[in-house]
C-alpha cells in the first residue's frame, strides 16, 4: 500500500508539473498585455478596430459570442473611437462566410457600409493579425474579442508590428461548459501562437495589398 501511494503521488506531481508548464504561456501573455486592455469608454481612439470571427449558426447568422464582438465594435464606432471596422473571419467555402455575416449584422446595428472592411482569409487569430498588418497596412488598432482571447490576440498583433489596445466583448453570461472549453482551447492555442511567432513563422493566405487608408 505505501508503494502504491508513492506511485500515485508521483503521478499527481507529474500532472501538476505538466499543467503548470501548459499554463505558463497564458500567464506570460496575460501579464505582458494586461496594461493594454481598456473599457469601451477608456479606449484610445484608433483609426481601425479589428473584430475577430467567432463562428456562425447553420443558418449563417452570428453566434452570441460573435454578436457581442460586433455590438462592442459598434459601440466604439458610435462613440467616435474608431473610423473603420475590419471584420476578419473564415470564408474557406461558399457555404460559410463569416465576414459577410458580420457585415450584415453590423448594418442592422446602424454601422454605415463605408465604415466596414472585410477580410475573408482570417482563418485564425495569427492570420488575422498578419493580414491586418501586411495586406490592410494597419499600424495601430483596437482589438475586440472576449477577455479569454484578448491576451493572445494582443500579443500576436503586437508581434507582427501593430500597436494595439484590446476591448473585452463579454456582454452577456456564457454557459460554464462553453467557458471551460474556451479556456482549455486557449491554453493550447497560446502555445501554438508562441511557436509560430518565434519559431516557425508561417505565412497565411496573402494576396494584393489593400490599404484601408490609401496614400494620396
Image: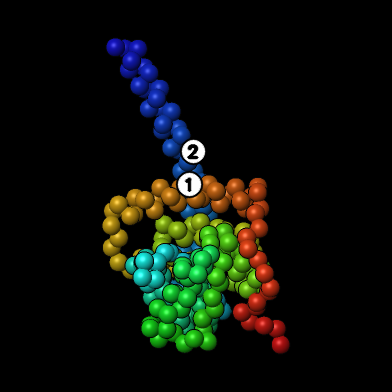
Please rate how many residues cluster around mark 1, counting C-alpha atoms within 10 Å: few if below 14, some from 14 to 19, many from 20. some
Residue drawn at x 47%, y 84% is: 80
Element at label 2: helix
- Using the rendered image of the protein, determine whether residue 79 is visible from the camera's viewpoint: no
Residue drawn at x 39%, y 51% is: 183
Residue drawn at x 42%, y 64% is: 55
In the image, is residue 171 above or below residue 151?
below
Identify the image quadrant of the C terminus. Answer: bottom right
Who is closer to the viewer here, 46 or 144? Answer: 144
Q: Which of the two discs, 1 and 2, labels the residue nearer the N terminus?
A: 2
Give how far across and how far down residue 72 sits, in percent.
Answer: 40, 74
Does residue 156 appear left or right of residue 68 in this picture?
right
Give how far across and how far down residue 66 sits, in percent.
Answer: 40, 68
Displayed quadrant of residue 11: top left
- Using the rendered image of the protein, determine whether residue 120 is visible from the camera's viewpoint: yes
Residue drawn at x 54%, y 78% is: 117
1 vs 2, front mark: 1
Residue 188 image label = 1
Element at label 1: helix
Give how far across and how far down residue 153 sits, in percent.
Answer: 51, 60
Identify the image quadrant of the N terminus. Answer: top left
Residue 84 image label = none
Give how far across and how far down residue 63 sits, in percent.
Answer: 36, 67
In the image, is residue 183 above or below residue 45?
above
Does residue 133 appear left or right of residue 34 in this picture?
right
Q: How is the image coloured?
A: rainbow
Who is closer to the viewer here, 195 or 36? Answer: 195
Residue, disc 2:
21
State the CA–CA distance, disc 1 to disc 2.
11 Å
Displayed quadrant of residue 42: bottom left
Amino acid at each position: 500500500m505505501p508503494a502504491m501511494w508513492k506511485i500515485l503521488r508521483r503521478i499527481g506531481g507529474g500532472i501538476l508539473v505538466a499543467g503548470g508548464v501548459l499554463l505558463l504561456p497564458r500567464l506570460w501573455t496575460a501579464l505582458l498585455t494586461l496594461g493594454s486592455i481598456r473599457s469601451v469608454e477608456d479606449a484610445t481612439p484608433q483609426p481601425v478596430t479589428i473584430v475577430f470571427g467567432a463562428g456562425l449558426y447553420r443558418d449563417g447568422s452570428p453566434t452570441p459570442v460573435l454578436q457581442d464582438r460586433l455590438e462592442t465594435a459598434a459601440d466604439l464606432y458610435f462613440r467616435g473611437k474608431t473610423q473603420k471596422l475590419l471584420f476578419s473571419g473564415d470564408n474557406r467555402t461558399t457555404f460559410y462566410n463569416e465576414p459577410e455575416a458580420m457585415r450584415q449584422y453590423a448594418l442592422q446595428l446602424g454601422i454605415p457600409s463605408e465604415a466596414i472592411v472585410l477580410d475573408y482569409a482570417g482563418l485564425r487569430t495569427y492570420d488575422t493579425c498578419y493580414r491586418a498588418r501586411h495586406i490592410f497596412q494597419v499600424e495601430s488598432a483596437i482589438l475586440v474579442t472576449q477577455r479569454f482571447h484578448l491576451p493572445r490576440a494582443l500579443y500576436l498583433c503586437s508581434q507582427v508590428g501593430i500597436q494595439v489596445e484590446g476591448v473585452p466583448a463579454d456582454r452577456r453570461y456564457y454557459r460554464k461548459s462553453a467557458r471551460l472549453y474556451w479556456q482549455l482551447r486557449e491554453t493550447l492555442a497560446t502555445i501554438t501562437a508562441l511557436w509560430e511567432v518565434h519559431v516557425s513563422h508561417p505565412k497565411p493566405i496573402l494576396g494584393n495589398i489593400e490599404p484601408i487608408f490609401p496614400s494620396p
